[in-house]
Each structure stands twice: as structure tokens, then as C-alpha cells.
Amino acid sequence: MAKRKNTLTRFLEDIVDDTKDFVDDLLDRAKDLETDVRDSAKNVVDDDEDAPSPAEVASLRASLAALQAKVDELTALQVKASKN
């Protein structure tokens, strides 16, 4: 195993190399963060497309009204049967 000479230029070279690696890692993480934020924002915007149309909302309201009428009818029948 050869021992490396510790000279001032080697010391500075190591500092520059480590700094370069550090900056490269920071830039990679910043790119990942930027991509994640962009994807998240795109997902929020795309969620608006999944909103039901006015026709679907009207259909659901009609179904709900019909269901409520059926529940009211059954409740009235149950009350009538309990009185007899």
C-alpha cells in the first residue's frame, strides 16, 4: 500500500473535489425536489378534471331524493304497523 504524500496542493485538491461532490449532490437533490413539486402541482390541477359534471350532480341529487322518499315511505309504514 503506497502512502500518499500530504502536500499543500493535495490538500487543496481534496477540498476542491469534496466541494465539487457536495455541490453536485445539492444540485441533484434540488432537481429531485423541483420535479416532485412540479408533479404535486400537476396532480392538484389534474384533480379538478375528476370533478363530476353538472349532469352527474343532478342525477345524484335525483337518486338521493328518490331514496329519501322511499325511506320516508318505509318509516310511515313502520309507524302505521306499530300503531295496529
Image (cartoon, rainbow, N blue to C red):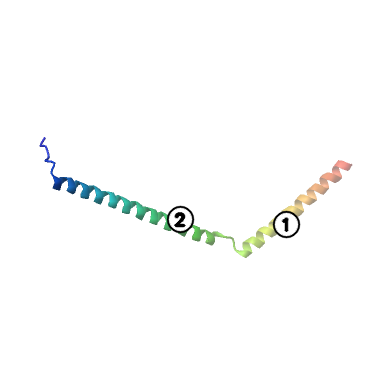
Q: Position of residue 83 (x, y in %)?
A: 88, 42
Q: Residue at x 76, y 54 (%)?
A: 69
Please name whichever residue, 27 or 75, is drawn nearer the observer in this view of the structure.
27
Looking at the image, tell me whether mark 1 or mark 2 is earlier in sequence order.
2
Label 1: few (<14), some (14–19) or many (≥20) C-alpha neighbours in 10 Å? few
Of all residues shown, which one is farthest toward the top?
1
Return the residue at label 2. 40
Q: Position of residue 40 (x, y in %)?
A: 45, 55
Q: Residue at x 35, y 54 (%)?
A: 30
Camera-near label (1 vs 2) is 2
- Kindly identify the amino acid type of the residue bearing the numbered disc 2: Ser
- Kindly identify the amino acid type of the residue bearing the numbered disc 1: Ala
Return the residue at label 1. 65
Please name whichever residue, 53 or 28, is drawn nearer the observer in this view of the structure.
28
Q: Position of residue 65 (x, y in %)?
A: 73, 57
Q: Secondary structure at mark 2?
A: helix
Label 2: few (<14), some (14–19) or many (≥20) C-alpha neighbours in 10 Å? few
